[in-house]
Amino acid sequence: MLSYLSYMLTAVAALLVTCHALCKCPGIPGLPGIPGSLKGQPRVPGLLGPSGSLMGLPGRYRLPWLEGLPDSLDTELRNVLVNLKHRLSRLEGVLALNGKIREVGEKIFASNGKEVDFASALESCEEAGGTLAAPMNEEENKAILDIVKQYNRYAYLGIKEGEISGQFKYINGMPLNYTKWHQYEPNGKGTENCVEMYTDGSWNDKKCNLYRLTICEF
Ligand code: MAN
Ligand code: CA
């Protein structure tokens, strides 16, 4: 019993050292960033839980880039994916730290800081592989509002008026599942086909040919 306990403690200590080393590990030649310690199977079989957490240890020892990878994956492929996820999460950390992105669930919101008309804003978002930001819940609305406040500029949303005036949809044609209209909006009755976000996070239907902050989602 005592020897099992001391084995487990050694194992946990070894893994924590490994985890600590992950951030500084120089990697192996030809495959930058792949820590040598992750080259083979996990050193302590069974210690990593299914969600990439160290079983029985507090949340701050979670390893999110180990999450969701099936054990059946080839070891080398698994290590490549683990390291890609680790590298991505560090890059996201840098971008978030520098105020370049807001992450909500699976979505990433970002602005190029430019004020252009609706069509140009949509075009630059699509060119970058995204689309115009459209909040689908309060949390997403807050994340977009954060950027609106950062630049202190109203922004166009990825929402347009449909055939029926007063009926607004996402630009992919789907009906809105969340709205945050300012009091008495929308009031354009077919003359204001786009939607802007005010600096309090509420929405106003507005003409599409004005200069508004570009905020994209990816
Ligand atoms: C202006 C425009 C409208 C808006 C009203 C609100 O006329 O921005 O879109 O509805 O102000 O007073
Ligand atoms: Ca209006």
Image: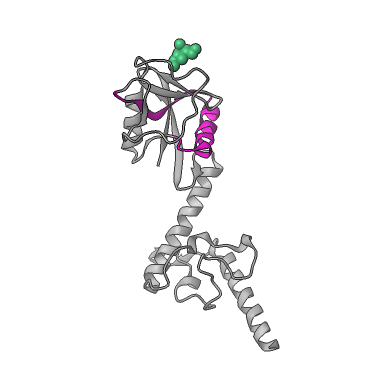
At x 45%, y 58%, the residue is 85
Position of residue 159 in the picture relative to residue 67 (left or right) = left
Residue 21, visible in the rendered structure? yes
At x 64%, y 74%, the residue is 13
Asked whether 203 or 14 is in front, the reply is: 203
Q: Quadrant of the N terminus?
A: bottom right
Residue 142 pos. (x, y %): 54, 35
In the image, residue 57 sits, relative to residue 215, either above or below, namely below
Residue 96 pos. (x, y %): 53, 43
Residue 32, visible in the rendered structure? no
Residue 149 is inside the magenta segment: yes
Looking at the rendering, the stretch of residues picked out in magenta corresponds to 135-163
Residue 108 pos. (x, y %): 45, 43
Q: Quadrant of the C terminus?
A: top left
At x 61%, y 69%, the residue is 16
Asked whether 175 or 199 is in front, the reply is: 175
Residue 154 pos. (x, y %): 48, 23
Task: Residue lying at the far left in this picture: please name it.
Answer: 163
Residue 141 is inside the magenta segment: yes
Colour scheme shown: one colour
In the image, residue 47 sits, relative to residue 141, either above or below, namely below
Asked whether 24 or 52 is in front, the reply is: 52
Numbered marks: total: 0
